[in-house]
Image (cartoon, rainbow, N blue to C red):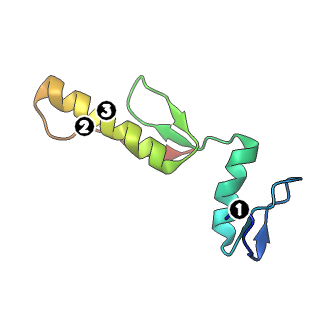
Amino acid sequence: GRGGVGAFVCSVEGCRASFSLKGNLKTHARMHTGAMPYKCNVEGCGNVFRWKSSLNHHAAAHQRRLSKETGVGKAVAGSSVL
């Protein structure tokens, strides 16, 4: 995390973040690059998100809306990685 000691260190000047896992550094890099690799698959939506958790929260909103409109328990709200 921020200022912690880890083998994988962010290379952005002034950042100081380091991580014990390479995947966590890759995830952190989105903060600097603005990458938004998670896309909503609901037809006509097209929203994109930086974090998978944000997509999951968004997909749940589609499910709630569809449940109210149709009375069906689950929508077809999925995710994809760009």
Residue reaching furthest front? 3
User: What kind of element bears circle 2?
Assistant: loop
The amino acid type, in three-letter code, at marker 2 is: Ala
Q: Do the residues labelled 2 and 1 touch (CB within 8 Å)?
A: no
Tell me which label, 3 or 1, sits earlier in the chain: 1
Which label belongs to residue 11?
none
Q: Distance between the residues labelled 2 and 1?
A: 38 Å
Q: Bin the neighbour count of mark 1 within 10 Å (Cα to Cα): few under 14, some 14-19, many 20 and up.
A: few
Q: Which amino acid does label 1 sit on?
A: Arg
Q: Quadrant of residue 78?
A: top left
User: In the figure, 7 relative to 52: above or below?
Assistant: below
How far separated are the C-alphas under marks 3 and 2?
A: 7 Å
Say whether marks 3 and 1 touch (CB < 8 Å): no
In the image, taking residue 53 as reference, residue 5 lies left or right, namely right
Q: Locate the N terminus by quadrant.
A: bottom right
Q: Would you name the residue on which mark 2 appears? A: 75
x then y, percent, for residue 52:
49, 49
Q: In this view, does 56 lie to the left or right of 71?
A: right
Circle 3 sits in a helix, a strand or a loop, which is it?
helix
